[in-house]
Image: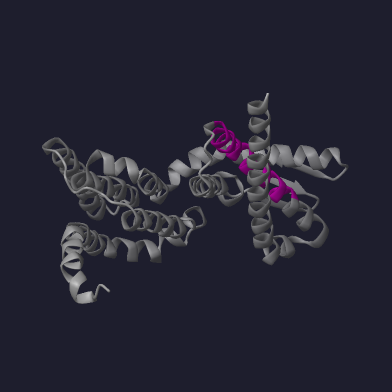
Amino acid sequence: MTSLVDKAPDIQKEALRRLPLIALAIGAGVLYLPVYLEFAAGPWRRDENAHVLIIMAIAIGAAAVRLQSEEFALRRSAGELGAGFLLLVAGLAMLALGRLAEADLLQSASQTFTAGGIVIALLGWRGAARLWFPLALTFYLIIWPGWALDTLTAPLKTFVSRIVSDGLYAAGLPVAHAGAVISAGPYQLLVADACSGMNSLIALTAVGAVYLYAVKHGDKRVNAAVLISLIPIAVAANILRVAALVLITYFLGYDAGQGFMHDGAGLLMFSVALGLVFIVDALALLAFAQRRRR
């Protein structure tokens, strides 16, 4: 029977082999800790960034599982070392510049370059290819400035307002809209950024990507069908959410529409959206399975 004493050399070798990864992980944590503390007190509290901590936890977990369960060679060429070093320097430069300019966009975007540089420098291109999923999730950690979100959400807010007001007016209710403002009887409601569809689109694509990565469909057509469906599902779910809030406000009053029912409508909308994703996934599996039988 092999004892712990007999296994000690192997344990020491494994610890030494993982030492560069551990050291760089600790170093990155020390560098980004002040940034994360500031984000936790500010940007991460906003609705449009509510998904960041969840995505970060998923990315770290996915990387840890792969690193623990698979063998990664620490051999890399001079070109891989150079490319990794350049990416790492670019990420740290973005971080420093973002700190000086107090630019959340630069500080958050630097995570992608820093993580990619560390992985390529230590594990090479093959290692980066095997860790593509957690690296791709770092794009969801970027904090976009308000002007960029306003530019992206303005057309969505107007579109959602028009669809909801036209639909409810056709149903016989006194509902109209002017831009992103919906008038329902004596009440006026502004379709805010949280209700425009952009926030749920970001969160839904992240959840959809995690779901597809977890189930590992062998048929790429199924994955493509689910990914393509995410945008219309997010927009449709938000139309239902806004319509529900307009109806609640019209029949129960403004306070009801802005109270706990507002948050409840958001949770209901996201649950419906996830249900639709699972339905699309099941239908795509069924459709492509039938084609293979023919």
- Identify the image quadrant of the N terminus: bottom left
Q: At x 61% / y 36%, what residue is drawn? A: 229
Image quarter of the C terminus: top right
Query: Percent x, y for residue 171?
Result: 86, 41
Magenta region, main secondary structure: helix
The part of the chain drawn in magenta is 221-243
Can residue 35 be seen here? The reply is yes
The single residue placed furthest to the right in the displayed view is 172
* Quadrant in the rendering for residue 260: bottom right
Residue 179 seen in render: no
Instruction: Between residue 172 and residue 266, name the one nearer to us.
Output: 266
- Percent across and percent down for residue 213 are 48, 46
Compared to residue 24, the image places residue 170 above or below, namely above
Q: Residue furthest front?
A: 1
Q: Nearer the viewer, residue 221 or 234?
A: 221
Left or right of 151, for residue 96 = left
Task: Name the spot of residue 104 as percent of width and height, x first.
Answer: 34, 52
Query: Relative to residue 294, is residue 55 depicted above or below?
Result: below
Relative placement, left or right, of 32 versus 210 is left
